[in-house]
Image: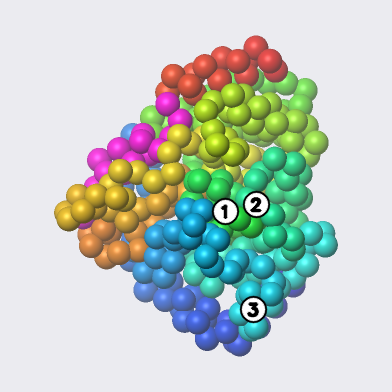
Amino acid sequence: MKEAIKHLFDAQLCDWEMAAKNYAALEEVREKTFAISGNTIRVQFNPARIVSSAAKVDAKSIQARACFLCGANRPAVQTGIPFQAKYTILINPFPIFPRHLTVPSVLHTPQRIAGRMMDMLELAETLEDYVIFYNGPRCGASAPDHIHFQAGNKGFLPFESAWKQTSSLLSETKRGLIWKISDNLRRGWVIEGSDKLNVCLLFDTVYQLLNELPTTDEPMMNLLAWFEKGKWIVVVFPRKKHRPDCFFREGEDQLTISPASVDLGGVFITPLEKDFNKITSDNITEIVDEICIDKVNEEDISNRLKELL
């Protein structure tokens, strides 16, 4: 698969002018770094991501546009690689990562993770050089009407290498380990295991506990997953809010930031230069605290996980 992905990128960046332009522009992307509560957070000024950050995802807007992840509506120049006969691996034409993939389902069905964690783990195993991520339908997914994963090359997200130093072991079971994120910024859990089915079962336990919180579709969450040294790592960032208040403000207080998996993984995306220039560590801390699950709910679920596992 590694060679097939390489050939896909080579061919698409040769044939697809818009994608080639956006990947070339990554070399000019500006970044700055903050140290927040001992965490490394990078902020990226990436104008092409305005398509996703400012996407209209209300029901009326979704119904009014053709689904851009459906095969019939994708650009004729966009080609992909079949995965398990259920998904298609595509290059993302609006990249954050130097190698950024989108993996939509062949069928047009809503963005829901229930029943698809095994697919996510198998994708992580197949794309062993990538981190796979999932944005819930109200947690940053710009196509909440079409189930899809994304993937970015390993080594890009700060959380990927730092999570174990900033997490505490919550429960050790025959199925695997569950860690509580304890970095004084984000809230959530990390599942670690060497058996796909057991990792899925552990995730299902977390999912069901989150499902007890008020929700309109599925529990709000962003997920990261990768495979290394014979183990799967699944990061669960539970959410309580889609976009922070600053997204909707006017004037100097407005920040066009719509956090998703990448942001919580340690790379905040600012599609507008004015936001990149003025964002501060305090802004980031406030945004993360506002969108993540409440500390009380996180602690309650953590205690119940210890009792159940």
- Toward the viewer: 100 or 254? 254
Q: Which mark is residue 144?
A: 1
For residue 121, side relative to residue 96 (left or right): right
Q: Quadrant of the C terminus?
A: top right
Magenta residues? 278-294
Residue 292, magenta (yes or no): yes
Horizontal and vertical percent for residue 199? Answer: 73, 34
Q: Are marks 3 and 2 in contact (CB under 8 Å)?
A: no
Q: Residue 147 at x, y = what percent?
A: 65, 54
Q: Give yes or no for contact between labels 1 and 2 (Cβ–Cβ under 8 Å).
A: yes
Residue at image location 44% in from the left, 60% down from the top: 55
Quarter of image, res 105: bottom right
Question: Of the residues shown, which amino acid type is indicated by label 1?
Answer: Pro
> For the residues marked 1 and 2, what is the alpha-carbon distance in whole angstroms?
6 Å
According to the image, label 3 marks what residue? Answer: 78
Q: Is residue 305 above or below residue 238?
A: above
- Cα distance in 3D space between marks 3 and 1: 21 Å
Kind of residue at disc 2: Pro
The location of residue 187, given as percent across then percent down, is: 46, 31
Q: Residue furthest top?
A: 307
Residue at left offset 70%, top offset 60%? 108
Q: Position of residue 182 (x, y in %)?
A: 46, 27
What is the three-letter code of the residue carrying label 3? Gln
In the picture, measured across the screen, residue 209 lies left or right of residue 142, that is: right
- Rate crowding at label 1 as few (under 14), some (14 to 19) or many (20 or more) other CA atoms within 10 Å: many
Distance between mark 3 and mark 2 Cα atoms: 22 Å
Residue drawn at x 57%, y 84% as measured from the top left:
16
Q: Earlier in the sequence, mark 3 or mark 2?
A: 3
Residue at which label 2 appears: 110
Are there few (<14), some (14-19), or many (20+) residues within 10 Å of tag 2? some
